[in-house]
Image (cartoon, rainbow, N blue to C red):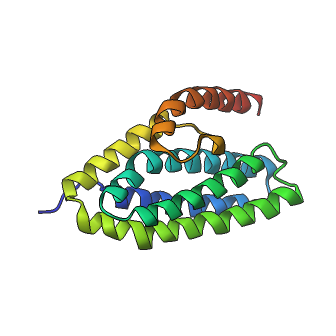
Amino acid sequence: MTSSTQNVVELLTAQHRQVERLFDEVQTTTDTDRCARAFDELRRLLSVHEAAEEIVTHPNATRHGIGDVVEARHAEEHEAKELLASLDGLDVNSAEFASGIERLRTMVLEHARNEEELEFPTLLAEASEAELEKMAAAVLAVEKIAPTRPHPAAGESAVVNAAVGPLASLVDRARDAARAAMR
């Protein structure tokens, strides 16, 4: 029996492809405003995506016996969050931004590949289809309230993200609205 509902692996993999497209747009567009908007969208997607993985996906993968794989993903996420935070607010036309976005792209795409090759197959093999669908619903719910900016100091703990995330999200979303209004 197949389900028409998306499972968590399908959802996160589709988001990985969206991240790739946004990196392409940021790195190839010559229009400064369009590049800044694409980077804002990329920053938001990476932030909510990683928060949801930390709260939903990684704990479930750990429960299925691959804690070592998850720990390596946490380290990758923390490094990427720090770099993403350092890029936020830079002039998208600066050499510092260009070199930073290239490093971030390499890190993030390698991280996504590692999840797809090392973490997701275990989830697909060990979790039921119903559990995978519930995880997808949980990821989408978390993404609605997750911070839209990286907060590397918060760490990668699901507990810390659940406690700090909603407040950080309110501040981030207010900041996003103000920035959008000023464009």
| Residue 10 in view of the camera | yes
Q: Is residue 11 above or below residue 40?
A: below
| Image x and y of residue 72, in percent | 52, 64
| Image x and y of residue 69, in percent | 45, 66
Which residue occupies the foreground of this view, 91 or 61? Answer: 61
Q: Residue furthest bottom?
A: 117
What residue is shown at x 86% (from left), y 54% (from top)? 93
Which residue occupies the foreground of this view, 58 or 180? Answer: 58
Q: Is residue 44 above or below residue 120?
A: above
State which quadrant residue 23 falls in: bottom right
What residue is shown at x 41% (from left), y 54% (from top)? 58
Q: Is residue 156 above or below residue 30?
A: above
| Image x and y of residue 123, in percent | 31, 63
Q: Is residue 59 above or below residue 163?
A: below
Q: Quadrant location of the C terminus?
A: top right
Which residue occupies the foreground of this view, 144 or 128? Answer: 128
What residue is shown at x 20% (from left), y 59% (from top)? 128
On the picture, is 95 further left or further right than 81?
right
On the picture, is 62 further left or further right than 5?
right
Q: Residue furthest left?
A: 1
What residue is shown at x 73% (from left), y 49% (from top)? 34
Q: Quadrant location of the N terminus?
A: bottom left
State which quadrant residue 61 falls in: bottom left
| Residue 150 in view of the camera | no
| Image x and y of residue 138, in percent | 34, 43
